[in-house]
Image: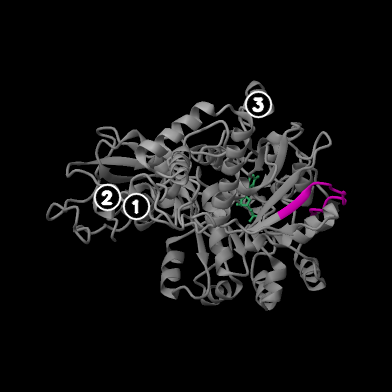
Amino acid sequence: MTTTPEITAAGFDTLGLAQPLLKALADVGYETPSPIQAACIPVLLAGHDLLGEAQTGTGKTAAFALPLLQKIDLKRAVPQALILTPTRELAIQVAEALQKYAHHMPGFHVLPIYGGQSMVVQLRALSRGTHVIVGTPGRVMDHLERKSLVLNNLQTLVLDEADEMLRMGFIDDVKWILEHTPAERQTALFSATMPDVIRRVAHEHLRDPKEIKIRSATSTVVTTSQSYCQTHTGQKLEALTRILEVEDDFDAAIVFVRTKTATVELADKLEARGYSVAALNGDLTQGLREQVIERLKAGTIDIVVATDVAARGLDVARISHVINYDVPYDTEAYVHRIGRTGRAGRTGRAILFLAPREMYMLKLIERATKQKITALTMPTPGEVANRRVAQFTQQVVDIIKTEKLDFFFDVVRRMEGEQDIAAREIAAALAWLATRERPLQMPGAVNDHAPRDAAPAASPTNAVSPAPTFERKPDFKARSKPDDGAAAEPRRERPAKDGRSDTPVTQRTFAPGTLARYRIEIGRNQGVLPKEIVGAIANEAGIAGKDIGQINLFDDYSSVELPANLSNDLMDILRRIRVRQFALKTRVMEPGEFVDTRPPRRAPPTRDSKKPDWKKPAGAKPEWKTKRS
Ligand code: AMP
């Protein structure tokens, strides 16, 4: 049977998933199942074998992970599911996804095992017991042969990216593993393509599998002009804001992201950079949703950050740009998205951000829209500055044409005479004044308009525009808030792959004083390491390592010592920091909330002690670590 699922607005709750999983999906902000999820989850929950044709980016991980998790018996720490992946990176990624979806399954353990990692470490981890193994074929075979991995209790076997495993020469290992697992297991095989060899493996080892394939949309001729920008995840925000600055005919934009959480996070970041923006997601009531649309129509907001479901049917003529900030699941979703622009006879513009591993979508979309998608590179600071200068020049020209300036001619003439300054210098100083809130130069820009000769008339400190401290003005589209913009913009400019900033935030200084204990919502079950917590807090909040005290990991949360009485702004940043995709939701611990169950120590530890001076008794919970351990 081959099923081509429709995208439906129905949430995950209609698919038969259990509460803890639904809760985890709400935590990560998934609004609606992707087509592959809508099709696969019920089939897998019903116990069928499955042959799925799906690429990375379609949401296939959750499609097999959620049903598999639903069947795990947490009381038995034996491998109940095995997922084979072609690469170590994918093994880790899949294990992290499982951990995320199992957030409300206390005591759940998943173990990635792959070549290149120390055998001793893996043997120790395996002997401790785990519910799910995610591994590369070679290493899984090794462990099966050594009997360090026993799969007698295996219920589910997933072959992820089977065609990649074939390409990398693992297919015999995969067949061997299939032959050494209980015959009554459920098997799901996912592959981006279905070469004959894979079909044969499926035929031999899967029992009457349901076939699920995500078909591309039937091709549609699209008149919207389309571009793509290849960028790493960490650069997307910077790329977006620069592109919006240099795009011709920008009026309003709809920016598509995948999750509800992402709509709010990106809207906040854009707002901090001075855009009038609102989030549109399935959590909004119909009334609030209509309000957002009305504000967009009326021009009180220029950008809406939306999920696919929330933006369905949105018809606002002034949307000049559709930005595919997160790549759509398939070409059909893409065509729906870009249909939000180019309405009422206007020309529209669609821009697609693609990470290098998502580039395969380009050809699919070109085929589906019967149009070439042109490459767009992220504008340089110089290009942005040139655009700002051009806009400024146009404003000056318009004012000369339209305003009565007689009084001001007099003012300038008087300045020239009384102060003995040339009109050109006065004009330069006035330009500086007029753009002080939104400097024409971006930090680091080399543009055609840098002052070449005479120093500006004003004080020498004015020679270079100060760091941007933007203010909203009616005649510019993008500016930052008066006070937080300067601090927020450089800090959040270039988050790295994990969503963290590459550029360290300016370090904050704290008067010497007491530390307080704060609770963060990530713990051992999420696989967090103390050094990751220190790194995230230091990079994102600018709190130096020396100001971070003891960190204690519990199953589902941790405590961390930080300076007491942090400002509201800083608390806000600390709440939003993400580690391993979990928002820390930092808050001060209540008196008595922290229960110190450590065994007695020989000497009181100091904040700078290199190692904890106590030993963890076997099996003790929670696990105590210092940030440097
Ligand atoms: P995958 O194809 O499994 O690698 O997933 C690609 C990306 O889509 C991952 O970042 C997932 O977190 C995200 N994702 C998967 N399913 C959904 C969903 N239903 N809603 C929003 N994002 C999703």
Q: In the rendered structure, which disc, 2 or 1, sits on the residue that comes first in sequence?
A: 1
The amino acid marked with disc number 3 is Arg
- Given contact means CB atoms under 8 Å apart, are the residues at marks 2 and 1 in contact? yes
Rounded to the nearest angstrom, the CA distance separating label 1 from label 3 is 37 Å
Q: Secondary structure at mark 3?
A: helix
Q: Secondary structure at mark 1?
A: helix
What residue is pinned by disc 3? Answer: 289
Q: Residue at x 34, y 48 (%)?
A: 461
Mark closer to the observer (2, 1):
1
Q: Which label is found at residue 548?
A: 2
What residue is pinned by disc 1? Answer: 538
User: In the image, is 49 to the left or to the right of 513?
Assistant: right
Q: Which residues are magenta?
A: 213-227
Q: In the rendered structure, which disc, 1 or 3, sits on the residue that comes first in sequence?
A: 3
The amino acid marked with disc number 2 is Ile
Q: Residue at x 64, y 23 (%)?
A: 291
The image position of residue 232, as x and y in percent, is 57, 59
- Given contact means CB atoms under 8 Å apart, are the residues at marks 1 and 3 in contact? no
Magenta includes 175?
no
Rounded to the nearest angstrom, the CA distance separating label 3 from label 2 is 42 Å
Crowding around mark 1 (Cα neighbors within 10 Å: few <14, some 14 to 19, many 20+) is: many
User: In the image, is 143 to the left or to the right of 609?
Assistant: right
User: In the image, is 229 to the left or to the right of 316?
Assistant: left
Crowding around mark 2 (Cα neighbors within 10 Å: few <14, some 14 to 19, many 20+) is: many
Q: Nearer the viewer, residue 312 or 54?
A: 312
Q: In the rendered structure, which disc, 3 or 2, sits on the residue that comes first in sequence?
A: 3
The image position of residue 85, as x and y in percent, is 62, 66
Q: Residue at x 58, y 26 (%)?
A: 404
**Chief SS of the magenta region:** loop
